Image (cartoon, coloured by chain):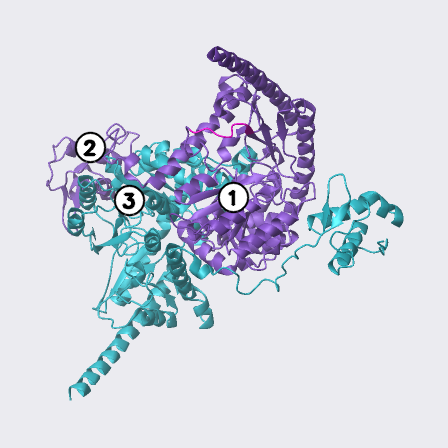
Chain colours: A cyan, B purple
Amino acid sequence: MIILKLERKNKMPLFRQIFQQLKRLIENNTLKPGFRMPSTRTLAEKHGINRSTVYKAYEELWALGYMESRPGSYSVVRKRQKIATPEQKSKQGLIQWETISSDVGLTLHHAYQELKSRLPLIKETFDAAGKPDVINFASLDLDPRLFPIEDFRRCLNTVLVEQGGKILRYGEGAGYKPLREYIARRLRVHGISANPDEIVITNGCQNAIELVLKFLTVPGSKVATESPTYTNILPLLKYFKTDIIGIPMKPDGMDLDYLREVLSRETQKPAFVYTIPNFHNPTGITTDQAHRERLLALCEAYEVPLVEDGFEEEMKYYGKVPLPIKSMDRKQVVIYMGTFSKVLFPGIRIGWIAAENKLIERLEAIKKFSDLSTNTLLQAALYEFCEQSHYNRHVKRMHREYRKRMHTALTGLKEHLSGFDRVSWTEPAGGYLIWVKLRDAGIDRETLKQVFIRNGVTIMPGTFFYPDSTLLSPNTNTSHQYFRLSISTLNENEIREGILRLAKAISKIYSHEGHEGARREEEKKIRSY
Amino acid sequence: MIILKLERKNKMPLFRQIFQQLKRLIENNTLKPGFRMPSTRTLAEKHGINRSTVYKAYEELWALGYMESRPGSYSVVRKRQKIATPEQKSKQGLIQWETISSDVGLTLHHAYQELKSRLPLIKETFDAAGKPDVINFASLDLDPRLFPIEDFRRCLNTVLVEQGGKILRYGEGAGYKPLREYIARRLRVHGISANPDEIVITNGCQNAIELVLKFLTVPGSKVATESPTYTNILPLLKYFKTDIIGIPMKPDGMDLDYLREVLSRETQKPAFVYTIPNFHNPTGITTDQAHRERLLALCEAYEVPLVEDGFEEEMKYYGKVPLPIKSMDRKQVVIYMGTFSKVLFPGIRIGWIAAENKLIERLEAIKKFSDLSTNTLLQAALYEFCEQSHYNRHVKRMHREYRKRMHTALTGLKEHLSGFDRVSWTEPAGGYLIWVKLRDAGIDRETLKQVFIRNGVTIMPGTFFYPDSTLLSPNTNTSHQYFRLSISTLNENEIREGILRLAKAISKIYSHEGHEGARREEEKKIRSY
């Protein structure tokens, strides 16, 4: 016999009171497993309440597993396994996720930990040092002050109002067709002829790289990249168990004699050659037309796909930059990648691959099964943004702005660093990056970082960009004499001030080095006695 | 000596006229490679134009590789490789993409072709048949008429106006933190306790599955799934070179005796067990509390991760559905997946994984290097949408709508199909799916599809959902007697009319089968003479 104490004046609804009390009776074992519950009618009549109220309570008990309702029969109490409260969850779960995985998964985890460990450079370290005005030459994010937020917002509204539900369903695997058509038209500006069916939209350029790796490599494949190169491709190459062949960067680009030797010597051809011909990350170097032609000819001769990463193609604000290698690609060996991240805003996460249709079809299939489709809403808004000429206008504005900013940076470097004869840097033809070399600095990466931090400025140490870098094995230490400056998030004043601090830091490095050198000389002397 | 013919009245800017004429002279070899170009000053003075106009033309020639400018010296003509026009691109490129790839890439390509071949069912076939009013029981997309477009649009505007640039930069690898916090709170409604750092946002549920496969499997790993199961997991499992162990579905869910036998017998433990306990895709079956407890206990006993796909968790419109298995997961063996696709709209491409933090950290790393981050803009808008209680209200509306729709479907089936004693179907406890069995239909998948198409209605043949299905090897043919009905895109009227057509088609199948059967009987007789 169940007696419930129901209070009609209670704020808690009646059905919930019934539920709570029955639940307690079951939990404290007053009602034992197997106990036949009264029918909803019986219980309702006894308490003078609506039958549906009791039913509602029973439904909850059923859902939570406190009762079993047998079709056409009475419900009985069952012993349910209790919900795990936060305290009840074991601190150490049953499965050792740290060791269960394939080593490939761990490679990325390791790399990500390393990557995250760099972030303090940009945030916490400075806050702690009481220098919130740190000038960030480390990040290759973009300057939010230049984002065309209002125009983009209006485009979002337009497509939602005009197209509504259509663009909120699953999208095409290859990406929103009007956007692919626009990209095809835009590529013509850069001399590339591609049809919309030779383009697949990706979740940014990183995702484009991953798709190509998924399709072109198997464990043990070789991949040739410039050395140094884009830092976030390195963990991926390891993850896919490829062997990285680093081709040294020379002042005019990848060493093509070295590459030719690799291509002719290797018994196993590289799965592809990865290159960033414009405003190379991290060195800022742009290759000339002759270099591009020779690189293409080499890839054609050895029938090796050439992955051309045009991530900053649009940022040719000095004008004098050759057309992409893809523009000459008669034999369809070039896989071209582009992105809106480095000219519009990174958060849009829209990039693309342009290549022969047979390859695109296959990359599209891989994309399809990895996420069904990229969201159509942002693609449609982006298309609207381009179609309304906002994109053209924005690119022009970016050109004006960064022409000035890069000029300020290069002028500042000349003014404040040309006094150091052991310091040199690249003069980029566009983009955001400058590569600085400190000859005989005599310090390690960590010290390098710290000296800059102490002077209120961050940079990206060169080691991050080498295939054999510390990104993959944190304890090695090479090429500490390079670092990357990015002006992508800074305005002219910030750049000016930043370069001053940079110069201060560098002067300390060399006086420190002199100091260190002197100490070492001293030690040598002592030992030689 | 170069003589240009410049027309000031021409609509074409002067610099472009200069560029065009010089380009032509170089291309037709009048100006040969190595020819020393006049200085900009000389050319400008001769034609009485501004020097900067000539400079602009030279810049273009330089960019296009028609000239080499040597620093501090004259420019010379160079023979450039011409841009490849569409006609010049070879029809068959140098590289045979069809054969270059790893077989794993080809698996997906093959599967995608198959997937695309189903689309005509939904579109072209019907248009061709002059039946644009086809009723689509095949698609598990959502009904755009129910999308809360206006509310979502306002949320997009709010976050763009209030946060602007902040949400247009690269986002956190694990996903937008406020959204993870909201999901954690929402999961509590379903009895799951998870902290935001036990959640990683993914590009929809498909992407969640891929992340788990990336981390938990190596080639040769075994994975246990229900059979039938979610069709788009099958190509992925093949792509990752896993062996699929199909656990038969019984009326109350995965056959747990069979699973136990697999777990105890297999020398190599499955990397994980994949289950859809609510409104199972494709069968619509919901397991009860006891089944859930036993499944969890099995996975704990054998220390095998349990991937719980809660893709329609929110669609419990009949109330009586047990809490997720994850709610009881004291020992942290459950990897729970959710998505906004099946209750809000699929185009948002936002899903998540909730699991032990150590695992989430590793999945986050893999996600990071596959696309850097999911776009923050839509995550922030979605958070705003949830925070403003739009999400709660929308879920309630979906419940009201689909409770009616499912009722209409089940009533219709009973009314029009209970006359066929060889036809039976599941009665789902929520969600969108009904699984229909045609006993002894005696036709193949293709005929099945065609009969429905001819009657103006589409369904999803059961074969697509089996691990050994035609999706992976198009020429085998099994279990043709099942098909899936999805009511997700249809309103009550459409469902009513659709079921009528369905009944018509089924009556034809059985009369055809009767016919066929009779013919076969006839043949048998003839042979037995």
Q: Which residue is more in the foreground, B163 or B317?
A: B317
Front tag of 2 and 3: 3
- Residue found 34% across the figure and 47% down from its top: A311
Q: Which residue is mark 2?
A: B21
Q: Chain of mark 2?
A: B
Residue B154: say if magenta.
no
Amino acid at pointer 3: Val
Residue B479: say if magenta.
yes
Front tag of 2 and 1: 1
Q: Which residue is more in the foreground, B267 or A171?
A: B267
Q: Quadrant of residue A461?
A: bottom left
Mark positioned earlier in the residue sequence (1 or 3): 1
Label ID, residue A307: 3
Task: State whether discs 2 and 1 lie on one chain.
Answer: no
Q: Secondary structure at mark 3?
A: strand
Note whether residue B43 is visible: yes
Magenta-colored span: B476-482
Q: Which residue is more in the foreground, A405 or A105?
A: A105
Percent position of residue A316, x then y: 31, 46
Question: Alpha-carbon distance for marks 2 and 1?
Answer: 44 Å
Q: Which residue is mark 1?
A: A153
- Quadrant of the frame with the N terminus of chain B: top left
Question: Alpha-carbon distance for marks 1 and 3?
Answer: 34 Å
Percent position of residue A367, x then y: 41, 41
